[in-house]
Amino acid sequence: MASSGTVRAYSTDEGWGIIDGPDVPGGCWVHFSVIAMDGYRHLVPGQSVSFRAEPGAQDGFAYQAVKVWTGDTEPGDQRREDAESTAYDSALALTFDDESSGTDRR
């Protein structure tokens, strides 16, 4: 069964936070990986959310979120493969000079 709550705190840099709600006394620990949304997944303190949690000790909290969403309807569990991500992406290509060119490398 889904619960409703409010984001108490969320560290975007660290990717985790705490949700308060009547079904999770003392708060519920949440990691960005369980937030059901496309693109950059984060929460904002004071934001209303719905979530599913299970008992589990994480950083001193008795509950851990297994799914969090912000809309009225719980999204499906399947990840959308066609969704564009706004996550950072980087590439590096290394090239080396041909040693047979006679260049002195001292």
Image (cartoon, rainbow, N blue to C red):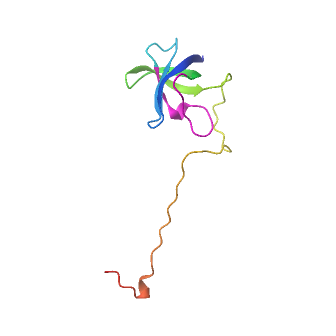
Is residue 97 or residue 57 the one in the foreground?
Answer: 97
Residue at image point 45% right, 81% down: 98
In depth, the one of 18 and 23 nearer the eye is 18
- Asked whether, in this view, residue 2 is left or right of residue 62, the answer is right
Q: Residue furthest bottom?
A: 102
Instruction: Describe residue 56's horizontal placement relative to residue 41 as left or right.
Output: left
> Which region is colored magenta?
28-46
74 lies left or right of 7: right
How many numbered discs sit on the rendered protein?
Answer: 0
Q: Is residue 42 magenta?
A: yes
Q: What residue lies at 40% left-to-right and 88% top-to-bottom?
A: 102
Picture quadrant where residue 3 is located? top right
Give the vertical position of 52 relative to 43 (above or below): above
Q: Residue at x 64, y 35 (%)?
A: 78
The quarter in which the C terminus is drawn is: bottom left
The residue located at (66%, 40%) in the rendering is 80
Q: Position of residue 22 (x, y in %)?
A: 52, 11
**Viewport quadrant of the N terminus:** top right
Q: Percent from the top left, x then y, of residue 4?
A: 58, 17
- Residue 59 in the magenta stretch? The answer is no
Coordinates of residue 38 in the picture (x, y in percent): 63, 38
Tell me the quarter of the picture where residue 75 sits: top right
Position in image of residue 103 (x %, y %): 39, 85
Q: Does residue 24 appear to the left or right of 51 in the view shown?
A: left
